[in-house]
Amino acid sequence: MTGAEPRAHEGQGAELARFSRQLYERGWMPGTAGNLSVRLSDATALITASGRAKGELTGREVVAVHADSGVEVAPGPLRASAETAIHCAVYRATEARAVIHVHAPYATAVATRVGHPARRRALRVERLELLKGLGLADPTSAALPVFPNWPDVPRIAADVAGHLAATPDPPPALLITDHGVTTWGRDLAQARDRLECLEAICQLLLLTGGLPPNTPDDAHDDTTDAER
Ligand SMILES: CSCCC(=O)C(=O)COP(=O)(O)O
Ligand SMILES: [Zn+2]
């Protein structure tokens, strides 16, 4: 943990570690994969440290950052998650108080099937009752964005920011092709519940053959002209 007081935010750090272990035990954060954050105030957030084994994370392996920029509040021995910029894009654009990113297998498989290495696409889901668990403005259908997995994480974050700015009532979830899934909510429990529903939806889509055909063309592109 960084900051002037070593024990600052101890409770929130312990909470991040508890959820991290829980998600690791489900197989959604293998090794060091995944990251979680909570908003501390309007200006700052606490995020898991980069490169730590997520099944053994302690409440001190977290880093305070400015919620808009991701800049660390006070430099210390730990680095904030390499994917902090994506969390900050969500905090800048939404009312979220918690963000969870994992490499859950079904959601990652669907993201990889639907996604494109260089274009944003949309995963369209209809009819499934579990949609009601995602916190959508209209729970009868969803268009979940699937972003390219640019090696430069700030570029993914810029794509996310563009999508959130351009989409009225965006779903509190996104997918990154070849990579994983991110959800958010008013707290870690709500973000986790949404993640569970999305992972179950992706499992059902794979079980029922409910995915669109695998096309190399732009048929499923979700990038608007303004964002290109
Ligand atoms: C072995 S996972 C590669 C990085 C990643 O995708 C991830 O979610 C974890 O990155 P962090 O910097 O938060 O440890
Ligand atoms: Zn990741």
Image (cartoon, grey):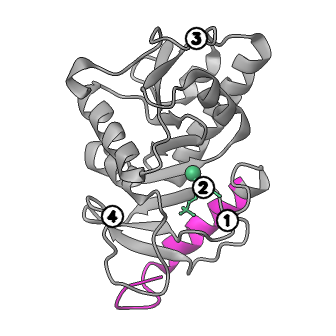
Label 4 secondary element = loop
Pointer 1: what residue? 54
Please say if 59 is above or below 3.
Answer: above
Q: Which residues are magenta?
A: 1-23
The residue tagged with tag 2: helix, strand or loop?
loop
Q: Is ligand 1 less than 8 Å from the beta carbon at label 2?
A: yes
Q: Which mark is residue 154?
A: none
Q: Please tell me whether residue 20 belongs to the stretch shown in magenta.
A: yes
Q: Residue at coordinates 34% horizontally, 37% vertically from top-left?
A: 159
Q: Can you tell me which quadrant of the image ligand 1 is in?
A: bottom right
Disc 3 to disc 1, how far (Cα)? 35 Å
Which residue type carries mark 2?
A: Gly
Query: Do tag 3 and tag 1 residues touch (Cβ < 8 Å)?
Result: no
Q: Is residue 165 left or right of residue 186?
A: left
**Mark 4 crowdedness (10 Å alpha carbons): few <14, some 14-19, many ≥20:** many
Dot 3 or dot 4, earlier in sequence? 4
Asked whether 62 or 160 is in front, the reply is 160
Quarter of image, res 56: bottom right
Mark 3 or mark 1: whose residue is earlier in sequence = 1
Judging by the rendered image, the residue that carries numbered circle 4 is: 70
- Tell me the amino acid under the disc marked 4: Gly
* Residue 157 position within the rendered picture, expressed as x and y whole percent measured from the top left: 36, 46
Q: CA distance from mark 4 to mark 2?
A: 17 Å
Q: Which mark is residue 215?
A: 3
Give the residue type that dot 1 points to: Lys
Query: Disc 2 marks which residue?
Result: 34
Label 3 sits on what residue type?
Answer: Thr
Reply yes or no: does residue 65 show up in magenta. Answer: no
Of callouts 4 and 2, the N-terminal one: 2
